[in-house]
Amino acid sequence: MKPRLIIGITIMVLFTSLALYNLSQSISSYVDFEQAKTLDGDRIHVIGEWVEDKPHGFSSEDMTFSFYMKDETGNTHRVEYAGAKPNNFEDADELVVIGSMRGEVFTSHDMLVKCPSKYNDPSEAEFTSVE
C-alpha cells in the first residue's frame, strides 16, 4: 500500500473515533433524583414537575432561581437553577433540569420548560370548513 493511503485511512479512523467519543459524552438519558445522586458529571437530566406549594424564588445574592421539583418516581428535591426564572415556568407541564446532584440539592445550569401545546388538545382545535 502507498504511504499516503495508510496515513489517510489512519486520519479518518482517528477522526471518526474522536467524533463518536464526543457524541457519547453529550448523550445522556433521563434519571430520577436517587439515580442522579450516584452519577458523576454535570450533564445529568432529571425530568419532573414543579411543586407549587413549596417555596420558590430568585436570589439576587447568588443569582439563582430555586424551587422544588418532584421527579417521575415521586422524589421531591430542591433545585437551584443558575439563572432567572423562565417566563413560562408556571405554565409548564414538565421540567427538565440539567446539572448535578450536590448533597440533597440538584444544581442546574440549564433547564427545559415543556408547556402544553394547543395543537395537542382536540377541544381547543379550530376547524374551518372549506366549501
Image (cartoon, rainbow, N blue to C red):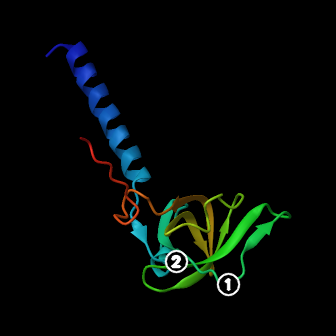
In the picture, the disc for residue 79 is: none
Specify the label residue 54 is tagged with.
1
Q: How far apart are marks 1 and 2 (CA)?
A: 22 Å
Residue that extends furthest to the front in the rendered view of this protein: 131
| Residue 82 position within the rendered picture, expressed as x and y whole percent measured from the top left | 69, 60
Q: In this view, does 55 lie to the left or right of 4?
A: right
Q: Which of marks 1 and 2 is in front?
A: 1
Amino acid type of the residue tagged 1 in the rendering: Lys
Tell me what residue is drawn at x 48 percent, y 81 percent: 34
The residue tagged with tag 2: helix, strand or loop? Answer: helix
Residue at 81%, 63% (x, y): give it.
Answer: 62
Q: Which of 7 and 86 is in front in this view?
A: 86
* Image quarter of residue 7: top left
Question: Residue lying farthest left?
Answer: 1
**Frontmost residue, 124 versus 43:** 124
Q: How many labels does the image show?
A: 2
Q: Which of marks 1 and 2 is nearer the N terminus?
A: 2
Residue 93 locus on image (x, y percent): 49, 69
Residue sitting nearer the eye, 35 or 74: 74
Q: Nearer the viewer, residue 66 or 109?
A: 66
Amino acid at the residue labelled 2: Lys
Identify the element where label 1 is drawn.
loop
**Disc 1: CA contacts within 10 A as few (<14), some (14-19) or many (>=20):** few
Tell me, for residue 37, which label it has, or none. Answer: 2
How far from the left and from the top, in percent, is residue 20? Answer: 33, 43
